[in-house]
Amino acid sequence: MKKYLSPSLSCTIFTLLITTWLFSCDTLRKTPERSSSYRSSRAPASRNTASRGRTSPARKPVAKAPTRKPTPARTTTPTYSRPGDANTGNVPEVVQIARTYTGTPYRSGGNDKQGIDCSGLICQVYSEMGVKVPRISWQQSEFGQEVGSVAEIKPGDWLFFVPEAGKEGYVSHAGIVTDVRSREEIIFIHASTSKGVREDNLFSTYFKGRFVKAMRPF
């Protein structure tokens, strides 16, 4: 005799089978997606890490140097007075002004009666006359025209000296001739490092051996 399942039991079994089948399909369908999603979310990080290992650090932009305007060409003595701006008639005035500095103490780099050095004395005397001459002694030693011999030296000429007697060297001292009394008595005014502004004889033992040249500025 054949046995038949009751309608309620058959329905329950059918429902379980359907549910099991649907669950299995959903699992098979979702698992690859999660796996794919996992790989896609991790892969870019791996690529970026490798990329960072190969790529040089970013460099900051370098600012361009500012464009400089061309510097005008310089001449040797762009603002100095030249021969013709003063004449021999002004020599007494040169001497007179220079002597007003007598007794002024020596001061390296000084330019007034509070203190002055040898080249500063020359520069300041002519400045008071409205004539501009070089400030540094070696530049002064190249200004104007060189006097050919000691016998030709006149008041107003500039005298130049080196540090050591009888030896060649750089110009380290200068003065202005104030009076020519004889062939062996040429008086000049200068700023002595030890005694300040005073007048001495070119032919004195100290200065005769150190004298190197005379210049006539105008």
Image (cartoon, grey):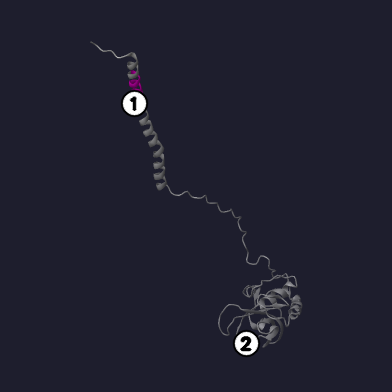
Name the kind of residue labelled 2 in the image: Tyr
Q: Earlier in the sequence, mark 2 or mark 1?
A: 1
Q: Nearer the viewer, residue 134 or 69?
A: 69
Which residue is depicted at the point 39% across and 36% down? 38
Q: Position of residue 167 (x, y in %)?
A: 55, 83
Classify residue 112 as left or right of residue 35: right
Disc assigned to residue 24: 1
Rendered residue at 37%/29% (across/down): 30
Kindly identify the amino acid type of the residue bearing the numbered disc 1. Answer: Ser
Considering only vertical position in the picture, is 191 above or below 55?
below
Horizontal side of residue 25 vs 109, given as left or right: left
Q: Residues within 10 Å of mark 2 (few under 14, many from 20)?
A: few
Which element type, helix, strand or loop, lies under badge 2?
A: helix
Residue at 65% x, 88% y is 204
Tell me the residue at 62%/87% (across/down).
206
Mark 2 vs mark 1, CA separation in Å: 123 Å
Q: Is residue 16 visible?
A: yes
Q: Which residue is mark 2?
A: 206
Mark identifier at residue 37? none
Quarter where residue 124 is shown:
bottom right
**Which region is colored magenta?**
14-22
Closer to us: 46 or 182: 46
Q: Residue furthest left?
A: 1
